[in-house]
Amino acid sequence: MEKKLIFLDIDGTLTVPGSNIPPASAQEAVKEARGQGHKVFLCTGRNPGMLAPLMRYGFDGYVGSGGGCVVLEDQILFDCPMSRRQQETAMELLAKNGVFRTLEAWDAAYGDRGMAEFLNRTSGGNSELVRWRKALEEDLNIRPIEEYDGRPLYKIVYMFAKEEQLREARLALEEDFEFLVQDLAGANCLNGEMINRKFSKGSGVKRIAAALGTDLKDTIGFGDSMNDLEMIRAVGTSVCMGNGSPALKKICDIVCPPVEEDGLARAFRDLGLI
């Protein structure tokens, strides 16, 4: 078969959300696919610092920060942080309106204090959400926002109680950024992220394919949520995990078993990649 470029979302696709350890079956599938001559890339909202622990499992590069940084082997193909004006405006207006922020630079992330307490208040007693946030902060090395030193930012993830808290930042920056908002399951709160209109996971896929001279029909993308939509639209064959968004499943060519049920390895076999 033609050699493929394979793009993998991380959280909910390659690993359970927030984890840095893929199931053994997924580790072996990636290794075998590369041994067959296919190239495998991470395609994630995580910044390079957050995805770095996974690179030891053997990948040919990545689309990081939702497309804001694209790396092929050791070559940086694309690097597009926010402008100083954009990041200062966003940080000021989100803080002013009581929005909890996670700032993502290339190699570090910084979170507002009090997020666990906020979740505890708004989650209706769902302690799992508090443990989830604590695990993310520890496993992904999210540092206190007081340590932020002004380095360029690629993305701001936010959490808040009422959508009107985003209004002022939207008015100032919506020309440059899409403000994604989604319910946080089991909680009376909302979360989302600012997505730069200059890039997406899909544009990252296209940059790597172009650099390698590969037709997009020979690309395969695996995802689980609607923040994977642009990747799914860009690739030749799209796969949604069984634990994924119902809306994404309707769009994808294939639905495979959940990440916890060795879904990635089973899909690799079904697609003839291994």
Image (cartoon, grey):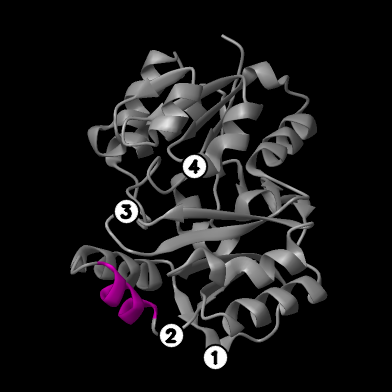
Q: Which residue is under mark 2?
A: 113
Residue 80 position, x and y percent, is 77, 58
Q: Secondary structure at mark 2?
A: loop
Mark 1 neighbour class, 10 Å CA radius: few under 14, some 14 to 19, many 20 or more:
few
Amino acid at the residue labelled 3: Ala
Q: Is residue 99 above or below residue 167?
A: below
* Residue drawn 78% across the image and 25% down it: 213
Look at the numbered discs 1 and 2 and tell me whether their residues touch, using CB distance below 8 Å: yes
Whole-angstrom CA distance, mark 2 to mark 4, is 28 Å
Look at the numbered discs 4 and 3 and tell me whether their residues touch, using CB distance below 8 Å: no
Residue situated in front as seen by the camera: 47 or 166: 166
Q: Which residues are magenta?
A: 115-123
Asked whether 118 falls inside the magenta stretch, the response is yes
Q: Foreground mark, 3 or 1?
A: 3
Amino acid at the residue labelled 4: Asp
Q: Which mark is residue 185?
A: 3
Whole-angstrom CA distance, mark 4 to mark 3, is 20 Å
Q: Foreground mark, 3 or 2?
A: 3
Considering every residue shown, the one lying at the far front of the view is: 164
Whole-angstrom CA distance, mark 3 to mark 2, is 22 Å
Amino acid at the residue labelled 1: Glu
Q: Is residue 32 visible?
A: no
* Mark earlier in primary sequence (3, 1): 1
Q: Which mark is residue 9?
A: 4
